Image: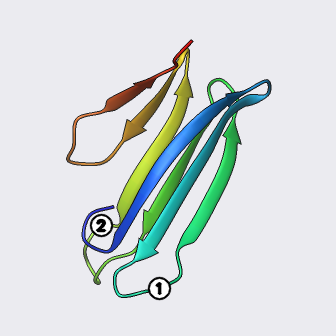
Amino acid sequence: MRGTFGGVAYYTVKPDGYRLVVTLTPSGAETPVRFVATLAPGQSVTLSTPRKLGEPALEVRFQHKGESLLVEVPDSPPRLGEVAD
């Protein structure tokens, strides 16, 4: 997420779905926050952080779609993470 957080996201393929791991560090903080979810085909999860009053939240959405993990960030083109065999 731009500006407020720095971080990294990755996934691994598991028998029950894609195990998504997102690690974020808020600006100026020493302790990161980790989010872990397993997404079955068709499932999605959205991470969101509020902004100033009247401004829309910053969001990133991860969706397990077919053989890919779709990453959507508002105001950015969608990116596909292809599954490596």
Q: The N terminus lies in which quarter of the figure?
A: bottom left
Q: Is residue 74 left or right of residue 69?
A: left
Residue 51's spot in the image, x, y percent?
32, 77
Q: Where is 58 relative to 13, above or below?
A: below
Which colour assignment does the render follow?
A: rainbow
Q: Quadrant of residue 2?
A: bottom left
Which residue is most to the top?
A: 85
Which residue is most to the right?
A: 16
Which residue corresponds to the image point at 47% horizontal and 66% vertical from the top-left? 24
Which residue corresponds to the image point at 62% horizontal and 34% vertical from the top-left? 12
Contact check, label 2 and label 1, Cβ < 8 Å: no
Residue 30's spot in the image, x, y percent?
47, 85
The residue tagged with tag 2: helix, strand or loop? loop
Q: Is residue 21 left or right of residue 77?
A: right
Q: Which dot marks residue 30?
A: 1
The residue tagged with tag 1: helix, strand or loop? loop
Residue 69's spot in the image, x, y percent?
49, 29
> What's the distance in space between the residues labelled 2 and 1, CA to CA?
26 Å
Sort mark 1 into few (<14), some (14-19) or many (20+) by Cα contacts within 10 Å.
few
Pick the front one: 50 or 3: 3
Q: Which dot marks residue 4?
A: none
Sort mark 2 into few (<14), some (14-19) or many (20+) by Cα contacts within 10 Å.
few
Which residue corresponds to the image point at 43% horizontal and 86% vertical from the top-left? 29
Kindly identify the amino acid type of the residue bearing the numbered disc 2. Answer: Pro
Q: Where is 19 relative to 64, above or below?
A: below
Kindly identify the amino acid type of the residue bearing the numbered disc 1. Answer: Glu
Q: The C terminus lies in which quarter of the figure?
A: top right
Q: Which residue is mark 2?
A: 56
The residue mark sitting in front, 2 or 1, is: 1
Which residue corresponds to the image point at 56% horizontal and 15% vertical from the top-left? 66
Pick the front one: 73 or 11: 11
